[in-house]
Each structure stands twice: as structure tokens, then as C-alpha cells.
Image (spheres, helix red, strand yellow):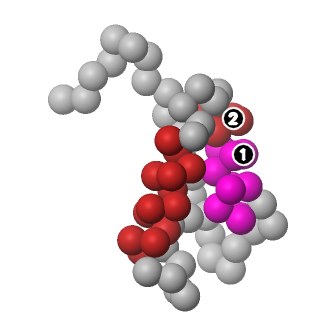
Amino acid sequence: MIERRDEDIDTGLTGLISTLTTCTDFSPEHLADALLARLHLTGGAGDDIALVVVRLNGMTRPC
């Protein structure tokens, strides 16, 4: 999603972060759909796409 042959990876990462900051209240399903749509991937891509959305509850903290 963020690494494309014709685009610098930093550009893709910036787009992903920008999209995520506007979708903080989305359900995992809605977030996945929104990410694909806003990153212009709803029609597929030339390579495989892997997308994992994880919801952490308020009590979960990374180690």
C-alpha cells in the first residue's frame, strides 16, 4: 500500500499516516475500506496487497 514502483516510500508512508489521522473512530472494517479508497486501491493493484487492521482496547499498551 505504501511502497509503489513509481513512488518514493516516504510519499506512500506520508499518505498512509495522513489517512489514518482522519479515521480514528472507524471500525476495523470501515477503516480497511477507507484506506483502500483513499489510497486509490479499490480497483486493485499490479502487485499483491496485504492489509491488517488491529483494534487495541484502551487497556492495551505496547511493550
Residue 56: quarter of image:
top left
**Range shown magenta:** 32-41
Mark 1 falls on what kind of element? helix
Q: What residue appears at the point 25 percent right and 29 percent down from the top-left corner?
A: 62
Q: What residue appears at the point 63 percent right and 76 percent down from the top-left corner?
A: 47
Q: Main secondary structure of the magenta part?
A: helix
Q: Residues within 10 Å of mark 2 (few under 14, many from 20)?
A: few
The residue indicated by pointer 1 is 33
Q: What residue appears at the point 46 percent right and 52 percent down from the top-left corner?
A: 17
Whether pointer 2 and pointer 1 mark residues with C-beta atoms closer than 8 Å, the reply is: yes
Q: Nearer the viewer, residue 27 or 19?
A: 19
Q: Quick one: which residue is furthest to the top in this view?
A: 59
Q: Quick one: which residue is furthest to the left in this view?
A: 63
20 magenta-colored: no
Q: CA distance from mark 2 to mark 1?
A: 6 Å
**Rendering coords of residue 57 (x, y %):** 43, 16
**Which numbered dot is residue 43?**
none
The residue indicated by pointer 2 is 29
Rendered view: 11 above or below 36: below
Q: Amino acid at mark 1?
A: Asp
Rendered view: 8 above or below 41: below
